[in-house]
Amino acid sequence: MKPGSIAIVGAAETTELGRIPHMSQIQLHADAALNACADAGIAIRDIDGIATAGESPTNVAHYLGIQPTWADGTSVGGCSFMLHVRHAAAAINEGLCNTVLITHGESGRSNVGRSAFRGGGASTLPGQFEAPFCAMGPPTTFTIPFLRYMKDTGTTHEQLAAVAVVQREWAAKNPRATFQDPITVEDVMEARMIAYPFTLLECCLVTDGGGALILTAADRAADFGTPPVYIIGSGESVETPMISQMDDLTSSRAFRMSGEKAFAEAGIHHNDVDHLMIYDAFAHLPFYGLEDLGFCKRGEAGAFIEEGNTRPGSKLPLNTNGGGLSYMHSGMYGMYALQESVRQVRGVAPAQVDDVEIAVCHGVGGMFAAGGTIIMSNARP
Amino acid sequence: MFADKSKIRVPKPTPETQHFWDGAKAGDLKLQQCDDCGHVYFPPRPFCPSCSSRAVSVFTASGKATLHSYVINQRPHPAFDGPYSIAVVELEEGPRMMTNIINADQSPEALQLDMPLEVVFEPLNDEISLPYFQPEGGQS
């Protein structure tokens, strides 16, 4: 994309987060969309582009009463919204639409009006070559690569636990976080084992919620009621629908390709980054993100987090909303990572970091199946 | 180890994968190799994922592998009588595949990364046998 040509001018989550049994999934999309419109100071009728995942853009457009000239249903898992931002930037720059709404809503916990689980059928490749071995969803699939990573890098169980501990420190500052009480490395390691080597506190939450973003051309951004958050770099890639078929179980190719593209577009170095979000479906994801995006050398992310380099007051604040481990995780968490990046760049986050100018927001889709990276700034390059 | 194999999701072969499942039923682990570039690959496709050539051949693999990575699922699954491993093994010929490690204690002590394994097929029904792996030489 053209760095700085597009801005986020509206951003909001659902009014409630957590357990929302009185709202269906499509209503979670709508609640977030209406909140984002209010944030931007516009009405739904001002929207002419729609992108979403988990629901079809047709469902969301019809439910909200949007008559779009552009629709994107890219659905590659929880980082789909990073890809939507990127695709929306291209669409706006190409003149396909002017004002894009990106929505997420998921009744992940209460399961109200949720679209059918999209697990592949028995004749798909995952259905033939992974499903028969009885993985029970992400906790027993997304976690499989980590013993290999531990052995190859010397990373320890304590370092994995430290990810959950540090993110809880951030969550303690956030009244909307699901879990706010402090925890120790011992607490994490002694929690109920879910799938060795992962305990319960190293696995993400399962909650209800949603979020929405509104994007437009940077030249129009001053017409809205919010301080513009400029998109200065973006990247995306996909690798494999089968975790067993990753090129390398200790590194995500999709992360590397997405991150490299985003940093090149933005023309920034890692030490320019004031704030970082890395989608943490499980506690090992920040290790992969830190290394595959180039913040840490291979095998050094465990010590980097354990030594406190991402905690409150540190040089690289990471997952400052508490992350999927402590804030919330409806299923496709990428939207909440983007929301926190926007809040931090605007300077309005509950656990606000001082002087954030450049924020990197990185998401995973599926189980190391996809990656998406968005770099934001409050200064137009 | 297994409590009720009828609770396992039965794979449904496609024209491109039928040779693999025919091999499994006969007790052979089938892989494919590119006739042009020599790349050995899995899962099955009628072309080479490395160089795109359609000139590929099916061959019987050695069945030898090493334990590349795994988890031990602690949550109950009706197909198993207790915690069980879900593993990725690296075949001697190079490709990796998902499986369960059977005929071994389902513990971190018994399941050491890079330990040698061998394929063992277990029938699910008259048509489908699944490729499992056990410690080389049988029961550990």
Image (cartoon, rainbow, N blue to C red):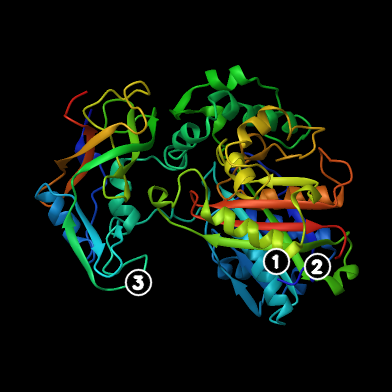
Residue underneath mark 3 = B52
Placement of B110 over or under A213, stated as above or below: above
Q: Which mark is residue A4?
A: 2
Q: Nearer the viewer, mark 2 or mark 1?
A: 2
Q: Secondary structure at mark 2?
A: loop
Q: CA distance from mark 2 to mark 1?
A: 18 Å
SS category of the residue bearing label 3: loop
Name the residue nearer the viewer: A108 or A216.
A216
- Residue B98 lies, in percent from the top left, at 32, 44
Q: Amino acid at mark 3?
A: Ser
Image coordinates for residue B29, horizontal then vertical, percent:
18, 50
Q: For this view, does B92 lie left or right of residue A231? A: left
What number is the disc on residue B79? none
Give the Cα separation between the discs numbered 3 and 2: 39 Å
Determine crowd level at label 3: few under 14, some 14-19, many 20+ residues with C-alpha closer than 10 A. Answer: few
Quarter of image, res A42: bottom right
Instruction: Give the quarter of the figure containing the N terminus of chain A.
Output: bottom right
Instruction: Identify the residue shown where x is 52% and y is 47%.
Output: A251
Q: Is residue A288 left or right of residue B9?
A: right
Of all chains, the one bearing label 3 is B
Query: Which chain's residue wears label 1?
Result: A
**Co-location on one chain, circles 2 and 1:** yes
Judging depth in this view, the residue of A245 and A32 nearest the camera is A245
Q: Choose mark 1 or mark 3, whichever is in front.
A: 3
For the C terminus of chain A, the quadrant is bottom right
Please tell me in which quadrant of the rendered image residue A220 appears.
bottom right
Residue beneath the point at 62% across and 20% down: A185
Q: Is residue A370 visible?
A: yes
Viewer-nearest of discs 3 and 2: 3
Q: Which residue is mark 1?
A: A101
